[in-house]
Image (cartoon, helix red, strand yellow):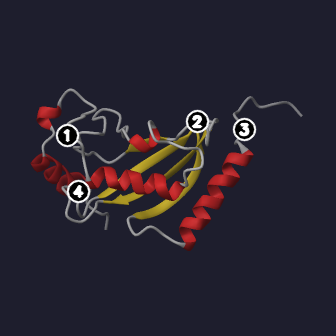
Amino acid sequence: MADSGAPKRPVRQTEKLLSALQALNDNPLPFVRDLQLGFVDGVNELTGILIGPNNSDYAGGHFRFSMRFPPQYPFNPPDFFIVTAICHPNVNSRFGTACLDALWSTYDPHMPLKVLLTELHNLLAEPNYDVPVDNDILEKTREKAREWTQSFAQPSE
């Protein structure tokens, strides 16, 4: 049988992610919804909705996100993307890439998926305006974050 040339889904990685999803189904995080694992452009991709933390500029918001797992995962961290339009100093305005310490300086291959999702939620709870991702930090204010949450991150009916 001829090889189709299409990338093959990494079996061990997929099994690890499915096990992590089962653990999240058994003990769900209250701020994560609609988790789905797919295979897109040759990598595993986890999508879902992150609920904005109470008492934050993102409270009440429903933010679609994507986690893309490189073939080297868990030795290399996944990439986080906020798909919903968001005004956040630590999220790239153009691409939605989230800048998380848990993904760069403190990442550990044994870090559970639950912890990574919690870190993403914490990024919404505590944006770091001192270390912005974009150069347009003057436009990223708390007031604008609340406005964008109301305009772009409301739950679908």
C-alpha gap between disc 3 and disc 2 = 10 Å
Q: For label 4, count other residues whose C-alpha is less than 10 Å away and answer few (under 14), some (14-19) or many (20+).
A: many
Q: For label 2, count other residues whose C-alpha is less than 10 Å away and answer few (under 14), some (14-19) or many (20+).
A: few
Q: Is residue 5 left or right of residue 17?
A: right
Answer whether labels 4 and 2 touch (C-beta < 8 Å): no
At horizontal 67% and vertical 46% (from top left) the residue drawn is 13
Give the label on residue 45, or none. Answer: none
Quarter in which the N terminus is drawn = top right
Q: Amino acid at mark 2?
A: Asp
Q: Amino acid at mark 1?
A: Tyr
Answer whether labels 2 and 1 touch (C-beta < 8 Å): no
Q: Which residue is mark 1?
A: 129
Estimate the x, y position of residue 102 in percent, counting from the top left.
Answer: 44, 44
Give the mark nearest the N terminus, 2 or 1.
Answer: 2
In terms of secondary structure, where does tag 1 sit?
A: loop
In terms of secondary structure, where does tag 4 sit?
A: loop
Q: Which residue is mark 2?
A: 41
